[in-house]
Image (cartoon, coloured by chain):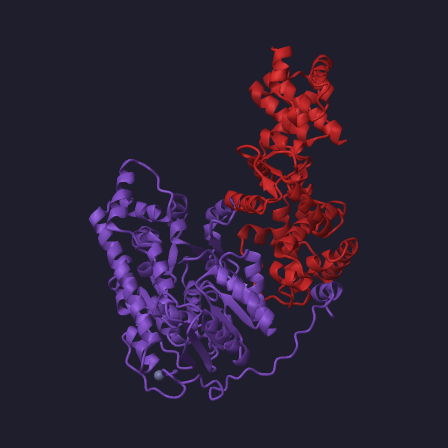
Amino acid sequence: MQREQIYQLLKQKYGFDEFRPGQYEVISQLLAGQDVLAVLPTGTGKSLIYQLVGTIMPGLVVVVSPLISLMQDQVARLNYQGEKQVAALTSQLSFGTRQQVLRHLNAYKFLFVSPEMLKQPEVLAAVQATPIALFVVDEAHCISTWGPDFRPDYLALGQLREQLQPQRTLMLTATATTQVRQDILAQLRLPAAQQVVYSANRPNIYLGVAAVANEDEKRQMLQQLVVTVKGPTIVYFSSKRQTDLIAEWLQSTTGLRVAGYHAGLSGEDRFKIQQQFMAGQLDVICATSAFGMGIDKADIRLVIHYHLPTSLADYVQEIGRAGRDGGQSLAVLLYAPGDEQLVRNLNDLTSASANEITQAFQLYQQNITPHDDLGQVLQFYWEHDYTVEQVTKIFEKRQRGKNDELRQLLAYVQAEGCRRAVLLAHFDEPAPTHTNECCQLKGDSLPVAALNLQAPLRAQTPPNPAWESILDQLFLQNS
Amino acid sequence: MMFSTEPRRAKAVFNVLRGRRTVSTLFAGLTYDCLSALDSWHGVPMEKFLASLQELLTAGDLATPMEGYVQLTTAGAAHKEQLQATLYQPVAFRAFQTIDVRRFTAISALALQVASQAVHHQNRYYPLTTDPGIQAIVKQWFRRQTVAHLGEQLHTELTTFLQSLPAPLPTVFVASISGFENPGQTDQQLATQLDKTPLEILVMRKDLACRWCLWLETQPQSCLATLLQPLVKSNPVTPSAWQTYQTVQQGLTVEQVAIQRRLKLSTVREHLLEVAILVPTFPYTQVLTPARVQTLTEIFADQPVVANWRFEQVQTVAPEMDFFWFRLFQIMRCQTNAA
Ligand SMILES: [Zn+2]
């Protein structure tokens, strides 16, 4: 296909004149018959790549995605863009609906599915019977970060891909170190895939770190930031409980419109909060990291981390939700001494000692089905004929990896010099020239005014209209 | 809310709430007078139920007279009375017995969104649900509508329905709709606005969903009626039990029915108990026979509390009588007491 035709399609289908950095390169490689690993920063419009390729190539586009909520967001977004032949095959569908989708796979262009769902014999058989144009592994870094000790079915993706025999494979991620990229290619058994790697750097996001003495000071700092800095704002937490508590506290103490968002909400509530945020009806979202993966809001100005993220890669991805419109934005990580313990506790949840692994293997030999998470993860390895020694090594390696990630995160938090340099070094990128718009050096204050990010005077939130007038707005044309 | 000062089996109450349709669950629902709540909390995990039970036990509102049973303490009974006076009390949960309320709620929410966007000529929006089954149903429905009148018609119907409701129900209902430029509000947001707990809002919304289904059942000309119809059953009983019941109504004995329907005698009996519990017009005397009714009436003549009857009492007087007749008689008495 000619370059002009591709640009024509971009204009005609999506109304754009230009591709974002990386999009065209990946599309043309795929159309030239290559498998591609694409590392493109958050906000590059990664889904446009497989949408466009799917439009050009005959056959189904299978997108492997880690979270149900993310799949639903992606389907909704494709629907929004006018793609009708889209479905997410999730455990939330009724049995009948699932059968219906599987029986009519030919009627679909895009199928979203988790590794666990794809591996089910009935699903695999139906997908296998359908010609596949493109096999997409979205959030491909999960293979390396979640595969070993949390979602082992990610490790079986290489085998599944070979069984499905897609014409092309596309691996997508926003952030991946050299090591993670190697892991992805090895696991998917595609050593010859082309790599299209773009910088993780987002120069329009100022990097701040606010060191506080304790939890109390942290709350005060959070409150001050959301009141004085221009929004819209996302505040990230690592616990669901804190998300709700602080959202309520912020709403009642600042008068801002705040909502909590996490995996515990119903699909309906998630929809409403996302749509309110996109429509500018919310000032602040307090969220766990699940928020924002699937939504496309270009004008987020402030991203605050109330807790440490689990790695620098996650941090880059989460702050990347700010400033997609290119405008000046601000990321602030709040840190109190001891915060790293929370990350260690989370890491411990998925760790396993040699002893535990041996015991789990003995239970497996006695045909006892495990009920705990760890036992179920280990089950995968036993079913794939791993030995206790091999599994112990894999778990040790992953724990070492997690300790490294935490160490590098703390190096960023406690950096004496340019933070952006530390961040980019993590992805083997050269240090940038530090400027006043780059990052907050230790001891400096946040240059909110210099960045032109002061909160405007906020109008009083109008009272909710009466139900009669909402009903008019909904269903009468000229109201 | 589901407990009284008489001991009740906690597990049975849980099974009523999540809609487990076994005869023992249904019978518990009948004797505990909470059948109307059947299936109203479908999908609630056991752990959550046990956790709230534990909270009430710790607070001293509930006590455990024996393993597996709970009853309200005096303080608990007073507390319940106070809550009943101040909290919203659902009135339409009986709809759960004959209508798939949950599915209708999901379908109609998408239908209202599609209609509202169409009224404003907006075709780029994020759909409320990505469930392909629900999307297909609504798409088919929408094709049969005349867009020029759809908005007005829905507006009129909703207004009529909502005007029949006490405040703040109309506010809660309308705030739950997602449509053009109105994403709607979450339970948490409504709770803040109306100064109630999110749980109370949730109960209101469940009850509203039921009320709306029941109202729409009486409006066959409504543009949403075709979406509701496939989700309505003519009676609350399972189809197989209903078939058994119809054979009995032809005048056959239980044994004859078993032969004709090629079912085990025990299955036929289970079916009849299910129908007896859920259908008030059950022909007790015909099935029980007047002789059995008389024997059983004599045995329990001086015991007004039906739930306290024990089958052993029957066995000492009439050892040949099956448990089935005893249970059926018990159900009959519960129904007449209730009526
Ligand atoms: Zn710097």
Say which chain is red.
Answer: B
Which part of the image, by quadrant, shows the N terminus of chain A? Answer: bottom left
Image location (x, y in percent) of residue A84:
53, 59
A332 and A180: which is toward the camera: A332
Q: Residue at x 29, y 39 (%)?
A: A363
Name above or below for residue B290 compared with residue A201. Answer: above
Q: Quadrant of ligand 1?
A: bottom left
Position of residue A9 measured from the top left corner of the image (x, y, whole percent): 46, 71
Identify the chain drawn in purple: A
Q: Position of residue A253 (x, y in %)?
A: 59, 72
In this view of the protein, which residue sits in the foreground, A161 or A439?
A: A439
Question: What residue appears at the point 41 percent right and 74 percent down from the top-left corner?
Answer: A213
At 56% from the left and 43% from the top, the residue drawn is B57
* Residue B177 seen in this snapshot: no
Q: Is residue B94 left or right of residue A298?
A: right
Tell me the quarter of the picture where residue A468 sits.
Answer: bottom right
> Which quadrant holds the C terminus of chain A?
bottom right
Q: Is residue A80 above or below residue B327?
A: below
Quadrant of the image occupied by residue B13: top right
Instruction: Identify the residue at horizontal 31%, vertical 60% (top origin).
Output: A144
Residue B4 horizontal/vertical position (percent) = 66, 38
Q: Nearer the viewer, residue A146 or A264?
A: A264
Q: Is residue A443 above or below residue A55?
A: below
Does the rendering let one see residue A367?
yes
| Number of numbered discs overlaid on the protein picture | 0
Q: Nearer the viewer, residue B285 or B249?
A: B285
